[in-house]
Amino acid sequence: MSTKEIGLPVSLSQGTYINTEYKNGKLQLKEVTKDSSGNPTYQPQGTWESSVISIGDQVTAFERVVKNLSTAGKNAKYRIYTKSSQNNVNWSDYVEINYNDSSINSPVGLYAQVKIELSTALSPTVFKVDDFIDGKYDTEYVSSATGSLKLKRNIALTSAIESNADGFLYRTRIDRKEFNKINTLVFQ
């Protein structure tokens, strides 16, 4: 009886993607958005699971997973798992491969699946919400003309003036719902 090694290609362009995507011929974490500098930001973790792989014949052993890796950033991590089945109904649990020699630790079966977990550490990113210039958000109570959003501290109110023999009476109505607190009232 002779033994031969059979390689079964696993396409990363097919399968189940959770917070991952297949882009430019590579499996990567899903891009979420771009930061203020135009750099992409990604999901912090995600998984990819292959479709069911039919081995097609009785095999004596699963040997290893052959992989081509390219990790961007020193905080990028990956884990590779396999599981197997004799009947495509009852499956073994996912078992992590041995990274020293890429050997598969799943029991031998007629069917197999591969799962890859990707993760990265969070890194600081700058997002610009707004420039707050040109008074774009100016209202009766808010100022945005100086490059920041500020509450106006001194609010001028128009008042009705009544005069009589004793002097002038200034009258202004202030609704309680418009102000939380009034520190002082100054008439000029």
Image (cartoon, rainbow, N blue to C red):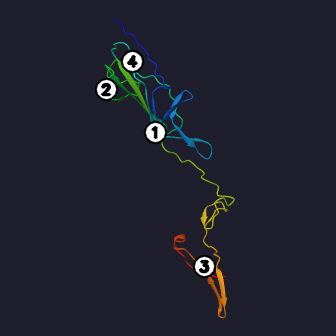
Q: Sequence order check: which comes first, mark 2 or mark 4? A: 4
In this rendered view, identify the residue nearer to me: 160 or 130. 160
**Image quadrant of residue 138?**
bottom right
Looking at the rendered structure, the kind of residue marked 3 is Thr
Inter-mark Cα distance, 2 to 3: 79 Å
Taking the view exactly as shown, the residue that stands out farthest to the right is 134
List x then y, in percent, for residue 53: 40, 20
In this rendered view, identify the residue nearer to me: 25 or 7. 25
Looking at the rendered structure, the kind of residue marked 2 is Ser
Looking at the rendered structure, the kind of residue marked 4 is Ser
Looking at the rendered structure, the kind of residue marked 1 is Gln
- Give the foreground label among 4 and 1: 4
Read off the residue under disc 4. 54
Inter-mark Cα distance, 3 to 1: 59 Å
Please determine whether, in this image, residue 129 is positioned above or below residue 99.
below
Crowdedness of circle 2 by 10 Å Cα count: few (<14), some, many (20+)? some
Inter-mark Cα distance, 2 to 4: 15 Å
Q: Sequence order check: which comes first, mark 2 or mark 1? A: 1
Q: Which mark is residue 172?
A: 3
Inter-mark Cα distance, 4 to 1: 28 Å
Inter-mark Cα distance, 2 to 1: 24 Å
**Image quadrant of residue 82?**
top left
List x then y, in percent, for residue 99: 41, 28
Read off the residue under disc 2. 92
Q: Which mark is residue 45?
A: 1
User: Residue sitting at 62 percent across and 43 percent down?
Assistant: 38
